Image: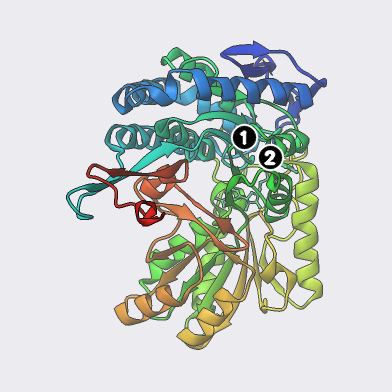
Amino acid sequence: MGSSSAPVRRYHHVINGADHPSGAGSIARHAPDTGELVAEFASGDADTVERAVTAARTAFDEGPWPRMTGADRAAVLRALAASMERDRDHLARLDAEESGKPIRQALANVDASVALTQHAAALALSAHGDSHTNLGSDFTGLVTREPIGVAALITPWNFPLLLLAQKLPYALAAGCTVVVKPSELTASSTVEVARLAHEAGLPTGVLNVVLGAGSVGQALAESDAVDMVSFTGSTATGGKVIEASRHGAKKLSLELGGKAASIVFDDAEFEDALDGVLFAGVFNNGECCVAGARLLVQDTIADRFLEQLVARMEKLRVGATTSPATDIGPLIHAEHLQKVQSYVDGALAQGAKPLTGGAPLTGPGFDDGHFYPPTVLDAVTETHTVFQEEIFGPVITVTRFQDANEAVRLANGVRYGLGNSVWTKNIDTALTVARALRSGTVWINTTIDGAPQLPSGGVKESGYGREMGQAGFEEFTELKTVQIRSGRRTPFFSLGERP
Ligand code: NAD
């Protein structure tokens, strides 16, 4: 299984283009499928954060990166994308071993990260502001788009490389300098990308990485030398980032938790809906912010749909992250496995009915890891805790509805608003429901799809700000209005008429 006999990786912080030793000991990472030690990460302290932020500040205030042409920045980003593509297998293996995601999904994450980096390069090339020449022949307005400055990028463990790629290339394309704080559980691919970026020609000090636990992220959010924090993580931690960043009124972009619904109407293409509900529910072990954790199914087809969903769930292969045959890998760590189990136990106590799964997997191949089977809980109502809170495991809850109004009310009846999917062949139903859903993304007859051109983000307690697309690029910029009088200015005070 997994990572046997590979040497333990050791990673330092990256500050001013060089490895920087640990400030406060190190953090050991054990593979979630085998329990083997796979990596040791440096652990930063206040001094490390200060050094990294100073490096980024100096690179922004005095260095070439914000001042060079968009074409030159684009060239560096394209070179970075090419080297990520070259190191595809290596990067995927790091993410799979540390996060527990199946290797096939880790490989797809690298491909998507390459595409995002290429897209950001194209935006660097084409970025421009606005001019206003209809204000009179002697008055011109320029609205320039400028890099926001030093951006702190804080990422979670569930998509280490992909979520970095939703932020970093866009920040760099805009001309920002950055300090990245990856999750302490999955930091390897971030340090590798920093190395590749320097090989690709990124000037030193533009991209710095500080490793460590939440206190490092907190110190970044508090730092006066940081202009913006782009954070992806839980809603609870997002609240701490809001508090920490108050001083100095930094700009924030927050990608927080979610509780997506897959809404299946009785006129849906049955096979497509089954496939989509299955994928959305258990993709990435269910440890996904837009996981279709809630199935809302029209009561007229519910029994038939569930019977076939369960049959498919039971065919999924749970196993080692590095096996190409694996559909579902281990959960991130033992405490998380317990948390998922306590959500399931709580649901059963509140009246939910288990259709499959429901207890950790044990036996050969499972005993050294944190394996949880695909699980379906029927008869879940909107008052149940599992309907309202993120479980973050391969668990789908089922709630039946009668009509579109009830489906929308149920889907919107949570504090999150990240993504939802609608499955119907009726265009009126699809559009009416899509427009009524309160979420940053709605998928119609597909789910967890995307493209670099399409922005992603949340409403309600799923956060604010957008990643990817033109909007994702613009998050890392601010507008400057330059007003130019080319004719004589009419005096405001007529002082000449006074004695
Ligand atoms: P988390 O909030 O525990 O940690 C995220 C990052 O924040 C980590 O790097 C962590 O070290 C850091 N951190 C912890 N405390 C901090 C503090 N006080 N100040 C600043 N930084 C701090 O989240 P997680 O468990 O790593 O990830 C899972 C969560 O992320 C889920 O809630 C999931 O929905 C969410 N998520 C959201 C998106 C999205 O796009 N909206 C994408 C992926 C994950």
> Which residue was labeled with disc 2?
221
**Residue drawn 67% across the image and 71% down it:** 387
4 horizontally vs 429: left or right: right
Amino acid type at mark 1 = Val
Q: CA distance from mark 1 to mark 2?
A: 7 Å
Q: Is residue 112 above or below residue 271?
A: above
- Quick check: 458 left or right of 138? right
Q: Position of residue 79 (x, y in %)?
A: 36, 20
The residue type indicated by label 2 comes to Ala
Label 2 beta carbon less than 8 Å to ligand 1: yes
Which mark identifies residue 234? none
User: Dot 1 corresponds to which residue?
Assistant: 226
Pointer 1 with pointer 2, Cβ within 8 A: yes
**Is residue 3 placed above or below 355 in the rendered structure?**
above
Q: Quadrant of the N terminus?
A: top right
Q: Residue at x 42, y 67 (%)?
A: 273
Residue 282 is situated, as x and y percent measured from the top left of the image, at: 57, 54
Residue sitting nearer the eye, 278 or 39: 39
Secondary element type, mark 1: loop
